[in-house]
Amino acid sequence: MRAPASRFFEVAYEGRPTWDIGRPQRPVVRLAREGAIVGSVLDAGCGTGEHALFLAARGHEVLGIDVVPAAIARARAKARARRSAARFLVHDALRAAELGRTFDTVLDVGLFHSLDETGRAALPDAYRGVLPVGGRCVLLCWSERNPWGYGPRAVAREEIAAAFARGWRALRVEPSELESLAPGWRVHAWLAVLFAA
């Protein structure tokens, strides 16, 4: 991730970012209930941990990683308060292989769209490096269908397909939404489920 992007998130977590809604995003809840999230989970760019905590409560072994220490501190505090088995670590998802283990599922809610072009190009290989063949990546990211001229750089469906073209098989890429604390916002997103080939 570019240093300016890291600084943006450090500043954002000094308060409460609009994406920190205090619960898991609905598409993640739906996929978990459908059985699309399996086994051990790496929550990449976990923020304050709501997805990791939700999945741990459903019986998954979960490790949440984020580059922002303040976000990880909040996630750990939530885990203690909820007596959750979810674990959290300050770590860069682009260096996921350094974790020294594999996972059955990688969950990415909002990380892919926050990276610059170099980071986006490298992230699929980083995820592939911690998944066995048949492991899956669940991706929820900001869509180019949003009409605003601000926010994270929008992602087109074709960009997801291109980024995950080598070493991946797409199960589905469908329109979705991201919830936000910003009043009146309807944030268009892409929801993708991809398998490591």
Image (spheres, rainbow, N blue to C red):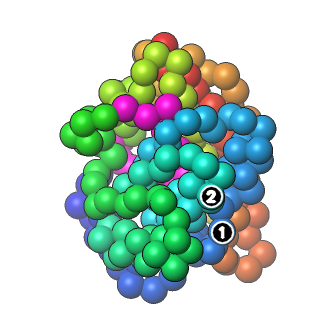
Q: Taking 82 as reference, is 32 above or below it?
A: above
Image position, residue 48 (x, y; %):
48, 69
Q: Taking 80 as reference, is 87 above or below it?
A: above
Image position, residue 60 (x, y; %):
56, 46
Q: Name the residue under label 1.
A: 23
Q: Name the residue under label 2.
A: 57
Describe residue 42's horizontal placement relative to residue 141 as left or right: left
The one nearer the camera, 187 or 64, is 64
Image position, residue 110 (x, y; %):
52, 54
Identify the magenta region.
102-119
**Residue at the spot 72% in from the left edge and 42% down from the top edge:** 31
Which three-letter amino acid code belongs to the residue tagged 1?
Answer: Arg
Q: Badge 1, how many Cα within 10 Å: few under 14, some, many 20+?
A: some
Residue at the farthest bottom position: 15
| Mark 1, secondary structure of its residue | loop
Give the mark nearer the N terminus: 1 vs 2: 1
Residue 18 sits in quarter: bottom right
Which three-letter amino acid code belongs to the residue tagged 2?
Answer: Ala
How much space separates mark 1 and mark 2, taking CA atoms?
13 Å
Asked if residue 61 shows in the view, the reply is yes
Describe residue 91's horizontal placement relative to residue 120 as left or right: left
